[in-house]
Amino acid sequence: MEISSSKRSCNQFTMDIAKNILEREAKNGSDSNWVFSPLSLQSNLALLAVGASGFTLNQTLWFLGLKNVEELHSLSSEIMSVASSTEQNQTIEEGPLLHFANGVWIDKRYSVSPSFAEIAKGIYKAEVNSADFLTKAEEAATEINTWVENATKGLIKSIVQRGNLTKSTLLVKANALYFKAAWETIFNTFLTRDKKIFLPNGETLQGESKQFSMYFFLPDKNNGLSDLVDKICSNPFYLTESFNLKVTELDKFWMPKFQISYGFEASNILKKLGLDLPFSMMAELKNITKNVDFPHEVIPLKVSHIVHKAYIEVSEGGTEAAAATEEDDSMEFSMYSPPRPPPPSFVADHPFLFMIREDSSRTLLFIGVVQNPLLVID
């Protein structure tokens, strides 16, 4: 399979973001778990590019690994193809559930330009709504948060915080991604056991008991997570490899259950990685809106925030995720691990990286790190 430049770029900024988060958490002395959705961020930036022009469009296309608007539309169609691939499944028994939603809210003083609205609704299946940011910012925030909560089946309660919306807010774009799937071979809950967890700081904890694949990358060393991320960062093809997985009988298999909710201001990292024009006063985003009373007026629009939030829960039954999982038991399980003398074991008792990928297109839905699976979500 030939890997497109957009895939390479997505993989590159995915791992660059992962490295930035890992370094920031380490600098803060934190052993936090975290997760984010490359697909969600990529979709947001692609829709932003639809409304951009001039240097802002060129920089956004460059960041996405695209040469022109035609490639942008091709990427957008691929994103939505992955997003709609499980629409026929109504229950987890029928297969993986993937729900993807886009929403646009524009201040009532303005309207969405017809060309942007056509693409937003036609390709991205986006809901385009009017809001009163000038006098009813809190009500608008509640509406957006309710939309996100519904789109993620209640896993993410809010994404807009008090003070995010002001009188100068003209436009809010949001997207939400919900994923739920069962393991091909369900883990027996009666075989769940407690086990020591080795934290990054050397401490230990006693643990409590198509097409979509979840991959676990376990460093050989207990403190090898940072080196693993650096290694993947050095090869933009790595996350799109086939890995040549095979069913392997394991002597020991242990994976902690975990639950992660993580949010961050993505715009800070994106600017650090070279995408800065959309956030500056030089932003050229004139293709998004127009003044209702003065249609020929150019509205000075720029991106103030890109707030990203994701949730994932992994247990014996399977995986549930959203973005806006035993010792002493032999079993068969597809895995990626360095060759070991037979019989091999896979014991994830120290920090590891994971990702959820749609394998036919090799699209990354979620990627994250587990450092302490016992951390409780507030």
Image (cartoon, grey):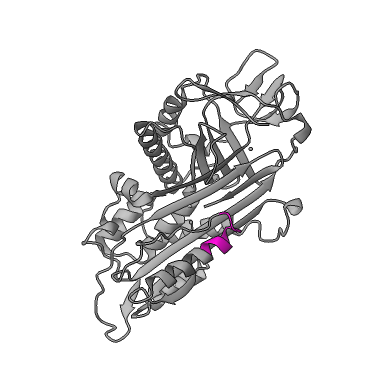
x, y percent for residue 16: 38, 39
Q: Residue at x 72, y 30 (%)?
A: 192
Residue 181 is covered by the magenta coloring: no
x, y percent for residue 138: 40, 69
Q: Viewed as shown, does residue 168 lie left or right of 260?
A: left
Whether residue 135 is visible here, answered yes or no, is yes
Q: Residue at x 25, y 62 (%)?
A: 283
Report the magenta residues as a range.
Answer: 147-155
Q: Is residue 2 above or below residue 205?
A: below
Answer with the quarter of the image where residue 282 lies: bottom left
Q: Residue at x 51, y 60 (%)?
A: 77
Q: Viewed as shown, does residue 11 lie left or right of 346?
A: left
Whether residue 124 is visible here, answered yes or no, is no
Q: Residue furthest front?
A: 378
Q: Is residue 108 above or below residue 38?
A: below
Task: Give the camera-side residue of 220 and 193.
Answer: 193
x, y percent for residue 166: 32, 67
Q: Residue furthest bottom?
A: 293
